[in-house]
Amino acid sequence: MYMNIHKDNGYSEFNQLTIIMRFSAAAIIGAFSVALFAPSVLACEHECQVNVSRAFADKYELLSNGYFTLLNGKVEDSLFYGIQPDILTETEKQTAIKTVTDSVIAAQTAWANTIFPTVFDTIFKDEPKFKGDCNHPHRVNQPPRGVNWTMPDCHNMDYICGNPPSICHFMPMIKTRIVKKLIGQLQARVDGDDSDVYVNNIGPALQAVVTAQPKLQPFVATLHGNLNQILETIKGSLVDFADEAQWKPVWDYEIKILLLTFP
């Protein structure tokens, strides 16, 4: 009787050990399979990067336009400040002003062409850049093809990586980075008579005005000083560029909706 019990216990223990080993092996294989075959979260690829950068750039171009409009308005109001009123006829004055304001429009176009690459680099090239693995740790599930990401995905993707929800989640930080860079670049463009806007646009326009109207030759220093003062005023006003009074909250929503349409 004792021997039978002993054999039964041994057999039972052996079976239990076998079951445990089989279960452990199955669990390991199952876990490995889940890790291996779980759908990976994809990154914001080139088309996504370009379109999202363009969406941001378009908004910042709208805001930039206001400063060039302000610059032109000040040229119209102050170009001839301190110069005797009858030195030119009204028609001659308007022609001179138009020469300078046309140069401002050219400067505006040149500036607008730089916004997109600045935005693109700020998001996808500057550190911390929105590229890289979005699967470790796991936060969101890749939607099926043809299905958009959701606002909850935007909320849940709480670390910087390369997928659209991560960019969506960190939009406030991204906007701060973009604005800081754009303000610095735009201020440099209007910073005195060695700035890009003066050297390449306003300065040559002023020279053309003086050449066309030799009567202004004695007032070149005054005209030059007026334009420098105008540029200084514009530079100072740029500290408010894209602040809460200028950036429309609906733009955030528009960019997020666009962003979440990309896989």
Image (spheres, rainbow, N blue to C red):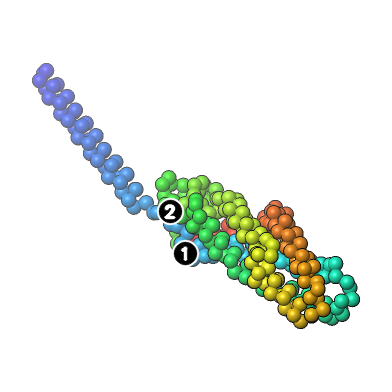
Vertical placement of residue 135 versus 225, above or below: above
Is residue 53 at least partly visible in the picture? no
- Residue at 50% over, 55% down: 126
Q: Quadrant of residue 196?
A: bottom right
Give coordinates of residue 218: x percent, y percent. 81, 73
- Identify whether 143 is placed above or below 136: below
Please tell me the numbered disc located at residue 46.
Answer: 1
Res. 240 visible in picture: yes
Q: Which residue is drawn at 58% across and 66% down?
A: 114
Identify the residue shown where x is 69% and y is 54%.
Answer: 239
* Residue at the right extreme of this rendering: 86
Residue appearing at x 39%, y 54% in the figure: 39
| Secondary structure of the residue carrying numbered label 1 | helix
Q: Tell me, yes or no, whether the two marked residues, 2 and 1, touch with CB atoms within 8 Å.
A: no
Q: Is residue 238 left or right of residue 130?
A: right
The CA span between labels 2 and 1 is: 13 Å
The residue lying furthest to the top in this view is: 2
Q: What residue type is labelled 1?
A: His
User: Looking at the picture, how far across and down is residue 244, in whole percent?
Assistant: 70, 52
Amino acid type, mark 2: Gly
Q: How crowded is mark 2: few (under 14 residues within 10 Å), some or many (20 or more)?
A: few
Residue 227 screen position, x and y as percent: 75, 66
92 or 128: nearer the viewer = 92
Quick one: label 2 or label 1, which is nearer the N terminus?
A: 1
Q: Within 10 Å of the Cα at label 1, are there few (<14), some (14-19), or many (20+) other Cα atoms?
A: few
Residue 46: percent from the left, percent from the top? Answer: 47, 64
Q: Badge 2 is on which residue?
A: 132
Front-lying residue, 47 or 213: 213
